[in-house]
Each structure stands twice: as structure tokens, then as C-alpha cells.
Amino acid sequence: MNEIVPNTPPSAPDDEYAPVVGISKEDTATLRMLEGKAADKTARDYEHIVWAYGVLWALFAAYGLFLWRRSARLRADMNDLQRALDKR
Amino acid sequence: MTSPTPPAAGFRLSHVLPDLCLFAAMPLLVYSVHRVFMSTPIEQSMGTAFKIFFFHVPMGWLCMLMALISGVAAAVQLRRRSSGAAAVALAAAEIGFVTGLGVLLTGPIWGHATWGKPWTGDARQVSTALLWLVIVAYLLLRHYGPRSSDRLAAALAIFGAVNVPIIYYAVKLWKTLHPSTGVVGSLPPEMWATFWPGLAGLLLVSLGLLGLRIRQLRLADELDAAWVQLEDPPR
């Protein structure tokens, strides 16, 4: 979007009134509406990003938990085997 | 009469390598997340949602890599009846399941943010979903099928590996919403500097988990053999 700059008012003689020229009320309202839309989109995008990253970490954490439980089961099996060997 | 020997223990590089991979991945992932949120400029057309790219694409690549590893290992298993290859195929398929699910979930989240629709029936989406379903079928057969279904499962894994080039070239073969295969190579330097730590970190995590799971499966096989020998010793 092009940068909006206030027009530079022409210089007036000392004894004459020079009107103040700047961004119109309509332009200000439009700018604020556009900025609001951009902020809403960024907030929605960040929500999507948090969901996407959360899903990834949850998946890897779930698989890590699965590996940990399998390891515990294998350790229990090894202990059983050791006990069976010790009995012989 | 000889007693069955428990599985061999002792230091081996193969025992330590998976842990090293996971250990090395941690700082890379932390750095990658920091770069994604603090140092990467916002992409012009897709806005902030583009930041999902830095993890979505590596997950897709890792899913395809694991499917290839699983397919090759399954082929070796079929050819040589190798239990080691069977363990590699199963472990790679499990990692492929995780990464495939990751790419199939993050893709629609990104699609909803960018295109307004989570699923568009795009060729790459559909072929990736097909690969993931083949991986699921393979895992179900391996975990719950009878012993005689191992060869059928191996054939499924090979079929999944054949799907990988179709996924990769889907953007060239059909009209899709996904960008071309050269998009990663054309990233500007500041985005490339964010992409590769995430890719390297996720690759190391995947390889570390793969190594751990292969070790578990080999140990389970050895324990089974030890129990059989204990309960039915050879004469």
C-alpha cells in the first residue's frame, strides 16, 4: 500500500490565514479499518500456527510415550526371563 | 544342556547413535522455532500463516523418506527372509505414520488459513493420503496379522515406496494448488536459514526414534527366541 503522507500546506504570507491540510477523516477511517483487518488476519494466522505446531509436538510426544511403554514391557520380559534362568 | 543366553549387552556405537541424534536435534529445533517466530520475514502473499511451511515441508519429506526406507527394507526382507530388515521396515513405517499424519494435519490447517478450505482434493494431498493409508494397512498387518501375513505386509510396504515419486512429481503431472518442486531451492536466504535447521532437527529426531525402535524390535525378537529355547530346549 502506498504510504499516505499529509500534503504540505503552501506557505502563506504572515497576515493571512493558511488552512491546515492533512489526512482526511475518510482516509483515517479507511486506514483504521484496513489495519484492523490485517490485525485480525495475523491473529487468526497465529492461531493456525499454534494448532499446527501443537499437533506436531503432540504426535512426536505420543510416539515417544509409545516407545517408552514398549521399553518398559521389554524390561519386564527380560526380568521374567532372568528369573526363569535363575530357577534352573 | 546349555541354558539360553540372554540378549548380548555392552557398549556399541549403534546403541549410542540414536540417543546422540536426539540429543543433537534439541538445540537445532529450539533454534529453528526461534528463527521462525523472531527472525523470518513475513511472506508477501500468504502472510503469517506461511510460517507453517518450515515444519510442514520437512514432515512431508520425512514421510516420503521413511516410506522409501520401509519399502527397501521390506524388499530385502522378502529376498533374504531377514528379521533385521523386517525390524527396519516396521520401524520406518511407524515413523512414516507419525510424519505422514503430521503433514496431513498441518497441511489442511495451513490450507484453511491460506485458501479458506482445508482440503481441496489436490493431487499431492490425495497421493500423500493414499501413501499414509498404505502405511496404516502395513502397520495393522504387522501388528495384528498372523505370522503368515509378513510377506503380504512387505508387498504393501513396497507398494507404498512406489507411491513416493508419484507424490513428489504430482505437482508436475497434474494441475495442483501446491507450488512446484523447486520452491525450497528458490527461498530467499533469510527463509532458507530458517528452513534447514528445522529440516535437520526433524531428520535427526526421526533417525533417532528409528534407531531406538529398531533396537527395541531386535531385542523383542531375541527375547522371543530366548523364551522358545528355554521352554523347548534343543536336544
Image: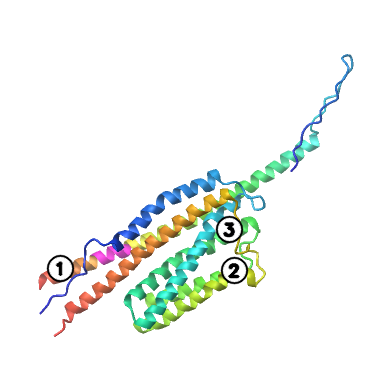
Q: Residue under label 3, please give it.
A: B185
Q: Which mark is residue B124?
A: 2
How many numbered circles does the render carry? 3
Residue A3 lies, in percent from the top left, at 74, 38
Q: Amino acid at mark 2?
A: Arg
Q: Dot 3, crowdedness within 10 Å: few (<14), some or many (≥20)?
A: few
Mark 3 element type: loop
User: Which chain is mark 1 on?
Assistant: A
Of the two numbered discs 3 and 1 in the rendering, the one whose residue sits closer to the viewer: 3
Q: Is residue B29 above or below residue B61?
A: above
Range of magenta residues: A69-75
**Figure colour scheme:** rainbow
Q: Is residue B58 left or right of residue A16?
A: left
Q: Residue under label 1, please give it.
A: A83
Mark 1 element type: helix
Q: Is residue B35 visible?
A: yes
Q: Dot 1, crowdedness within 10 Å: few (<14), some or many (≥20)?
A: few
Residue B10 lies, in percent from the top left, at 21, 62
The CA distance from mark 3 to mark 2 is 19 Å
Q: Is residue B214 above or below residue B190?
A: below
Q: Main secondary structure of the magenta part?
A: helix
Residue at the image point whose x is 44% and y is 51% from the top = B28
Do circles 3 and 2 both sit on a common chain?
A: yes
Residue at the image point whose x is 50% and y is 73% from the top = B133
Quarter of the figure with residue B180:
bottom right
Residue A35 lies, in percent from the top left, at 69, 41
Residue at the image point whose x is 53% and y is 46% from the top = B37
User: Which chain is mark 2 on?
Assistant: B
Mark 2 element type: helix
